[in-house]
Amino acid sequence: MEVKMYTSYDRIKAALEHRTLDRIPMTESMWPDTIKRWHKEGLPEDKDVMEFLGLDVICGIHPFDDGLSDAFPYIVYEETEEYKVDRNYYGVKVKYWKNRYATHIELDHAVKDRNDWERVKWALYPSEERITKDIVETSRKAREKGHFITLNCSEPYWFSFKMLGMENLCVQLKIDPEFIEDICTRYMEFLREMLIMTVNKGLEWDAIWFFSDMAYKNGPMFSPSDYRRFFLPHHKEISQFCKKQGKFLLLHSDGNMRELIPSVIEAGFDAIQPLEARAGNDVRIYKEQFGKKICLFGNISADILATGNRQAIEEEIRSKVLIAKEGGGYIYHSDHTIPSTVSLESYLFAVECAKRYGGY
């Protein structure tokens, strides 16, 4: 009997539709420092890490630029061997470290209030010149390889976050909600037109993937009622856009998302990722609560993978995968991005465990 060979596209699409194939889809992301370490530990320099690990591939394409570059030309203020201070296309003065991967420091924001926004919002306009070069060719090659293809872009909350900063955004939601509503409306007008322009180019794609950190360790950055007022209607519109074309809508959000998941489901998201374990998310609990309504994506603790303790790693994967895989609707991934504290040996063992317990 001939054994069916499934592609990354096949497995991920099945999980999003709550179907089962040969095994759960398994994918991952790693920091650059992790790849450097793994090269020293046996990962061939000329080998693609996902191919080496035998994982499913999501080809994430950044389809277009959504910055305010006409209002905020790129400027470098200071540069040394250790760091660089620049101003990005959102008007944010940022300090980046050169020789280590660490969170950047936001030093100042040009847009702080409604008056600042009124002066620069003209610079957020749709244009074919914003579309990423060679996007159609990139998607074509990914499709030939059987990859699952996502358009990775911001949505109204994350655009506001990038421009205003986390603290000021949360403050403005309360002191000037109409200001935030105006940003969201303007960005949605832009996003709608850019997505239509991009899709009309003829590229292959399977999902829109919003990267938008809406929570921290103890819960959401804002209340569920704020989510429903400011962001849910816009997310629902994009969900409907995807559904009309037979595509999916995915959400990446760090932090504890428990309070927001019901609203995320109502908005029409097909999957939520990465379900940070260190923030209190637990796929074993979420599977019972939400597993029939949304695909759960991630939740394998990178902290446990970093211990190198094989017994602990196997139990982390066994206990979660056996529950989460039932009836489909689960994609294996760490609970964030694999840090350089995880050895290649430990991660290879994790993959072995996931394949062993993730079969159907």
Image (cartoon, rainbow, N blue to C red):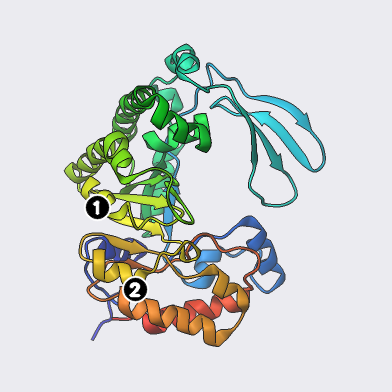
How many residues crowd mark 2 within 10 Å: few (<14), some (14–19), many (20+)?
Answer: some
Q: CA distance from mark 1 to mark 2?
A: 18 Å
Quadrant in the rendering for residue 76 = top right
Kindly identify the residue that appears in the image at 59 percent across and 65 percent down: 47
Residue in front for this viewpoint, 54 or 182 = 182
Query: Where in the figure is residue 25, as x and y percent of width and height?
Result: 36, 69
For the residue marked with disc 2, what is the amino acid?
Answer: Arg
- Tell me which label, 1 or 2, sits earlier in the chain: 1
**Percent coordinates x, y for residue 213 in the rendering:** 45, 47
Q: Residue at x 77, y 29 (%)?
A: 78
Does 341 appear above or below 149? below
Q: Is residue 133 visible?
A: no
Looking at the image, do the residues carrying marks 1 and 2 touch, with CB atoms under 8 Å apart?
Answer: no
Location of the C terminus (image quadrant): bottom left
Q: Which residue is mark 2?
A: 284
Whole-percent x, y for residue 262 in the image: 25, 54
Q: Is residue 160 above or below residue 299?
A: above
Q: Viewed as shown, does residue 276 lie left or right of 202?
A: right
- Residue 237, located in which quarter of the rendered image? top left
Residue at the front extreme, as displayed: 175
Residue 271: image location, x then y, percent:
31, 56
- Picture disc at residue 265: 1
User: Mark 1 is on which residue type?
Assistant: Ile
In this picture, residue 319 sits left or right of residue 360: right
Q: Quadrant of the N terminus?
A: bottom left
Residue drawn where x is 53% and y is 27% of the image: 90
Q: Tell me the residue at 48%/76% (across/down).
A: 351
Which of 133/239 is in front?
239
